[in-house]
Image (cartoon, rainbow, N blue to C red):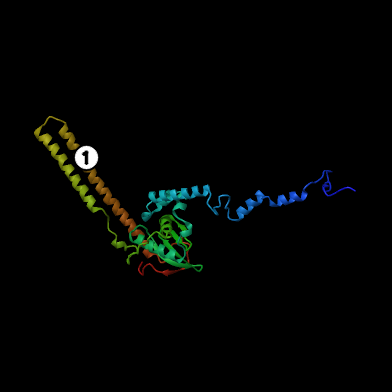
Amino acid sequence: MEDTSTQSEPDGPDGEAVEGGSDREDEREGVDDPAVDGSADRADGGSGRDGAPGAPTAGESDSDGDLAELRERVDAEYDFDDFGPADMARMSAEEWNAAFDPDTWITGPRLLDRVEDELKSRIARREVFGLLERVREDGEERVLVYSDEGYAIVRPSGEVSGRGTVLRDVEPLVALAAMEEYDVADPPEDWSLPHPETVPEGSGEFGNLIIQIVAAVQVIAGVALLVASLVMDLGSIVGPAMGIVFLLVGLFLFAMVANARLSDRFRSEEYRDRLRALREAEERPEFVPVEGEALNEESDDR
């Protein structure tokens, strides 16, 4: 009788004896599968082999560093206390996203209040020309600014629509008012556009007076040199030439003052005409696409 205690297990399909099959299975059960381990690591928050759960990758660190550097450069290059349309047009999309974080923007009724106060201050300083109204349309409050040449509509979401110079002036103001860091100044009590008759004829009279004095000195010096050359018969062309130069400079300065005063007069008259047109208009211009009721009137006499 054969002793089968040391006989191998039955042959496998290829005819070879399968030795230690159960042992191999036990070993496979104890071996770590790299794919399984990698999945487990990712499921645990990407801890990886260094054991730092959720640690930012090198790419993310570089991106955060570039963003911080860009924000520092934007803060140094732009003056947000005096941010205007020219700065807004010069700013690139990357600089805009770096300067204005959408997650921190002010929206809703508070944004409309800040925009309204900022616009009142700018109108009082004659930096924005237009009538300001708080209107309600489609169940939503909005800020409307319009003039005889354009308009701008500000919605609670911060969206601005319109056309003309008014839109160009209002867009940067909305961006500033949406920033928590920007301090909106309290508008004065009499912030509305001035009465046409109160607009002066021109400005800068002190500067014009100084130029006139300089021009008069130049003319007197030129005449004196010419008279001295003729009376004393100096026999040199230097005196008459310098006298003519002084005369020409003086006449040029007088002409420059006259042109400045004439230009100021024309600008003042044009400004008064625009004010009269706005005050005499009983309704909003036809190009303003707002039919909602006004929640506040700028003034009774407009």
Badge 1 crowding class, 10 Å Cα cut-off, few under 14, some 14 to 19, many 20 or more, is: some
Q: Nearer the viewer, residue 110 or 263?
A: 110
Residue displayed at 38% across by 49% down? 76
Looking at the rendered image, the quarter that the C terminus falls into is: bottom left
Residue wearing tag 1: 248
Measured as percent of width and height from the top left, residue 253 is found at 23, 44
Q: Nearer the viewer, residue 247 or 53?
A: 53
Q: How many marks?
A: 1
Measured as percent of width and height from the top left, residue 131 is found at 39, 63
Q: In the rendered view, does 208 fall on the left or right side of 228?
A: right
Whether residue 68 appears in this view of the structure is: yes
Residue displayed at 74% across by 51% down? 25
Residue 198: image quadrant is bottom left
Residue 165: image quadrant is bottom left
Residue displayed at 19% across by 45% down? 214
Residue displayed at 46% across by 56% down? 101
- Give the amino acid type for the residue marked by disc 1 in the picture: Leu
Check disc 1 and report its element: helix, strand or loop.
helix
In the image, farthest residue toward the right: 1
Q: Nearer the viewer, residue 147 or 259?
A: 147
Q: Nearer the viewer, residue 28 or 245?
A: 28
In the image, farthest residue toward the top: 235
Q: In the rendered view, does 35 fall on the left or right side of 51?
A: right
Whether residue 284 appears in this view of the structure is: no
In the image, farthest residue toward the left: 232
